[in-house]
Image: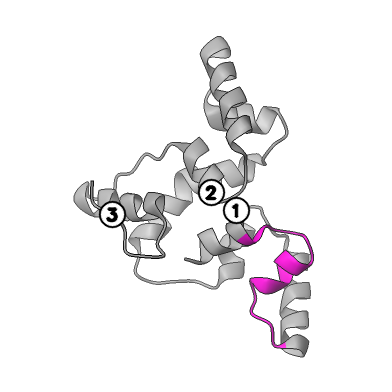
Amino acid sequence: MIQPPPGESRLKYQAALEITQNGGAWSPKIGQLLQEAGLITPSQIEVALYDQHNFSLPVGTILVLRGWIQQETVDFFVEKWPKLLSHAERYPLGQYLEKAGLLSPQQIDAILAEQAESGFRFGTIPVLKGWLKKQTVDYVAN
């Protein structure tokens, strides 16, 4: 298996390779991706896989039904994230976090206002406010 460059996420690197090699096609294991992004825990994945076996529902649906993640977030990481990884053009971090349903437009406005006053990087502020985990911000930013 090809290893990612130092400091790069293995799953994101693998996804980028698969997108390149398969003409844009990529089907991630959503549980693994959401765990790497710090949005769910290994225990939550175990429960979701158990439920999937018993109820024949998609893992993403189970995570939403159990209230562990928003449908908007699952949809973003399943449908939009792979396409964004394949584009060389990058967008502001807040745009990704809003599309994933992780930050509201009001929170982004508050972050931008505080950023202008404090000089902190955009991703630092939602972590300090407790809105997001550092792991999630780092995953989306990198």
Instruction: Give the mark, 1 or 2, whose residue is nearer the N terminus.
Output: 2
Label 3 Cα neighbours within 10 Å, binned few <14 / some 14-19 / many ≥20:
few
Q: Tell me the residue that label 2 is attached to.
A: 76
CA gap between label 1 and label 2 equals 5 Å
Determine the secondary structure under disc 2.
helix
Q: Foreground residue, 59 or 3?
A: 3
Instruction: Tell me which residue sits at (73%, 34%) in the image.
Output: 67
How far, Cα to Cα, is label 3 from label 1?
27 Å
Secondary element at image label 1: loop
Magenta span includes 127: yes
Q: Earlier in the sequence, mark 2 or mark 3?
A: 3
- On whether residue 138 falls in the magenta region, the answer is no
Question: Residue 79 location in percent, x, y?
Answer: 46, 45
The kind of residue tagged 2 is: Phe
Based on the displayed image, in which of its 4 quarters is residue 96 positioned?
bottom right
Look at label 3 and name its amino acid.
Gln
Q: Is residue 54 left or right of residue 19?
A: right
Question: Looking at the magenta stretch, what is its main secondary structure?
Answer: loop
Mark number, residue 61: none
Q: Residue furthest front?
A: 6
Residue under label 3, please give it: 3
Q: Which residue is mark 1?
A: 100
- Foreground mark, 2 or 3, reads 3
Marks 2 and 3, Cα distance to the nearest angstrom?
Answer: 26 Å
Q: Is residue 129 left or right of residue 26?
A: right
Q: Which residues are magenta?
A: 119-134
Number of callouts in the render?
Answer: 3
